[in-house]
Amino acid sequence: MRRLTLRVHNLTDPDVADVFWRMVRRAEAVDGQPPFNDQALVDVRAGSRTLIALVEPNDDEPGDTIIGAAILGQGELDLVLDPEWRGVGFGGAALTGLLGSASPHLTAWSHGDHPAARALAESHGFDRVRTLLQLRMPLGDGDAAAPDSARASASASASDGVTIRSFDADTDAEAWVALNARIFAHHPEQGKMTVADLAARQGEDWFDAGDFLLAVDEGGELIGYNWLKVEDDLGEIYVLGVSPDAAGRGLGRTLTNAGLARLRDRGVSTAALYVEADNEPAVRLYRSVGFADHTIDVQYRRKSSPQASSAQV
């Protein structure tokens, strides 16, 4: 009978990091998307969430086998099994072990809404509470593929006195964090971003200040932004926001088109974004400029259990 052990690890250990990232790449190759979102990785690097390796002890040969990993803390769980070790019961064993020290109101993401993850969540007392759509759009070749309206909206200055420029880390960081918190005041992840979180993302290989578009009014006040993330041939609208004070002026569409123009200039062939399924105005906007469904992520919340451990991670 196979056994499973949960072990806390740290990504600052080069050997651990090597095994972890190779497993993440294998899972992404099979599933079509990464098993962990950016915030989970930022948190585990910062030490605010814990990296837990799922280990099958090996009594016959030296060394144990890492068959999966979890990121746990702040009431959230992300879990992945190495594709080689799926379908043999390790997922259920891992989740049972992880729940022993977790919050009774734990939330967990299923990236891609895989049937196996859905069954696992339901069998362990989780309810589906959020749906996140991933939309994609082919960009074609440069301006030849861009509608006239998109090229017009992507100009450096908008017609109503709004200017679109690149992010400056020295002067814009605090203003951006403050605006982001206002825009996403009721969002469980995005609205909590701090200056330290922003700095951590600026340290990522994909970060380019030229891909971080800011909209400022005639007085120089920041009123919106479109932050892009380019990796290989995929350009993501990482997060787009408009100040509540500037709502209803078409700034969201202007920023969307400016971002698409920037991605075309970068030579990216496909644009992507994530949007809450119940954010109907945003979904309508993105579909109207050419985005279509690609896949979905689902968040589950654990039903409150009086038997849950009082030691919460």
Image (tube, grey):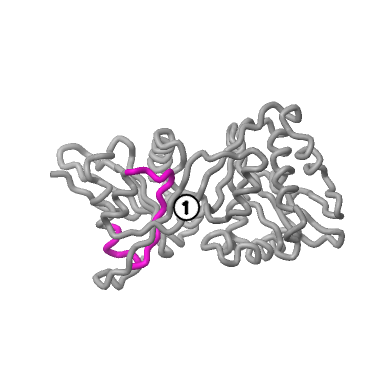
- Is 99 magenta? The answer is yes
Left or right relative to 205: residue 217: right
Q: Secondary structure at mark 1?
A: strand
Q: Is residue 103 above or below residue 44?
A: below
Q: Is residue 108 or residue 207 the one in the foreground? A: 108
Question: Residue placed at 57% from the left, 39% from the top?
Answer: 292
Residue at numbered disc 1: 131
Question: Residue placed at 22% from the left, 39% from the top?
Answer: 62
Residue 209 in the image: state x and y as whole percent: 70, 46
Residue 302 in the image: state x and y as whole percent: 34, 62
Q: Quadrant of the N terminus?
A: top left
Left or right relative to 228: residue 70: left
The magenta stretch spans which residues?
98-115
Question: Residue placed at 19% from the left, 37% from the top?
Answer: 61
Q: Is residue 20 or residue 37 the one in the foreground? A: 37
Residue type, mark 1 in image: Thr
Q: Residue furthest left?
A: 1
Residue 121 in the image: state x and y as whole percent: 32, 53
* Other-residue count near label 1 (Cα within 10 Å), few / some / many at <14 / 14–19 / ≥20: some
